[in-house]
Image (cartoon, rainbow, N blue to C red):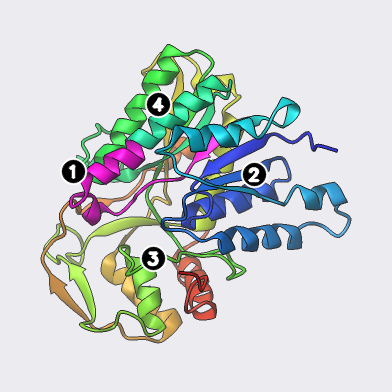
Amino acid sequence: MVSQKPRILIPGGAGYIGSHVALVTLLTRKYKVTVLDNFHNAFPTAVKRLESIAIDELPADASQQDKDDCKVDVFKGDLRSKDDIAKVFSSYSGEDKIWGVILCAALKAVGESSEIPIDYYDVNVGGLVNLLKVMHDNDCHRLVYSSSATVYGTPPKVPIPESTRLAPESVYGRTKWMSELIIRDVCDAYPEFRAISLRYFNPAGAHKSGKIGEDPRGKPGNLLPLLAQMAVGKYREGGLKVFGNDYPTPDGTCVRDYIHIEDLAGGHVNAVEALDRDDIFAQGKTETKGKYRAYNLGKGVGMSVLNMVDAMKKVSGYEFPHTIVGRRTGDVPDLTADPSLAERELGFKAKRNLDDMAQDLWRWQSGNPEGYGEQ
């Protein structure tokens, strides 16, 4: 028997953010999940583990159908190939056809994006266009899009509301900004499309089980996974490099709004459930004529680089010797969210704090010093 739950496709669903989004989506017991991933910066083991967590968290009286619905269909493929995307859509039909998409797949390193811009535009923008084409061809018109706070560039005021002008200062940020414009234009042109962009601030931590977490291939480009790996003995040579201590912030280092990955993942479910609410897209709430909205996903609390170093020192016991080096291209002084719109309209509020993020990250990394153990 085919379950009647709507099926959600998550491109990038084996990655750090995508795997947590897939898990939280399954835990609602309202949806089935299909993952499309090229495993460029992700591992199949993550999907196996999230399936296991989902089954473990079922109530004792769960039916066999509930257990079957915790199984994730996985397709290896790339958004740069329309054929790869079309193959996924053609694998489902009737009541089981793909109902909606949560797009998590992207290249995401700010510094790297200025070195290989063609790749970033190809994957992040070109891949989105391919996906939208195939979605439209298959009468699938619900999209939740992983955007980024980098679309704001250096904001004129902090905390940052969604009404802030968009002025990204990195190639990565520009790919997200362009993608938002494309989605908005598609929603304006096709009344059947409904889309919500979620502007992530800084995801951190890992699932409380310690079974899934962030495992970037090579040296981590983001602060927290780098600190976690240093604490288990990796990448210690030369110590930690802090990019700039002359920013207009309390301790001179960059300030970011860190949000626990489980809270962030939960925000995607809030967004999915809002897609069919006409009040969300009511005229007067949006500058566009189509059914498109954008929301910040943040906690609304800024933490500096040195704050994060102290938090990881506390849970791991490692001292993190560090040196100050020059600013990094594309970094802005302070990205702290005003999260009130998402709370008001989506019912989203980040609950976990910095200690939770550090403890859960350390549980993951100390329990999995080699990550998923795959090459």
Distance in Å between CA atoms under marks 4 and 1: 21 Å
Q: Which quarter of the image is occupied by the N terminus?
A: top right
Q: Are marks 3 and 2 in contact (CB under 8 Å)?
A: no
User: Which residue is denoted by mark 4 in the rendering?
Assistant: 183
Residue at (23, 81) in percent of width and height? 239
| Residue assigned mark 3 | 217
Whether the magenta-drawn stretch holds residue 113 is answered as yes
Mark 2: secondary structure: strand
What amino acid is labelled 3 in the image?
A: Arg
Q: Quadrant of residue 358?
A: bottom left
Which corner quadrant holds the C terminus?
bottom left
- Residue depth check, mark 2 versus mark 4: number of the one nearer the observer: 2
Location of residue 229 in the rendering, given as x and y in whole percent from the top left corner: 39, 76
Image coordinates of residue 322 in percent, x first then y, are 21, 79
The answer to the question of whether label 4 and label 3 lie on touching residues, with beta carbons closer than 8 A, is no
- Residue 238 sits inside the magenta stretch: no
Using the image, tell me which numbered label, if any, was put on residue 33.
2
Question: On residue 231, which mark appears?
Answer: none
Dot placed on the residue nearer the N-terminal end, 4 or 3: 4
Are the residues tagged 1 and 2 within 8 Å (C-beta)? no
Residue ID at (46%, 64%): 214
- As measured in the structure, the alpha-carbon distance from the residue carrying label 4 to the one carrying label 3 is 30 Å
Dot placed on the residue nearer the N-terminal end, 4 or 1: 1
**Along the horizontal axis of the image, is 235 left or right of 245?**
right
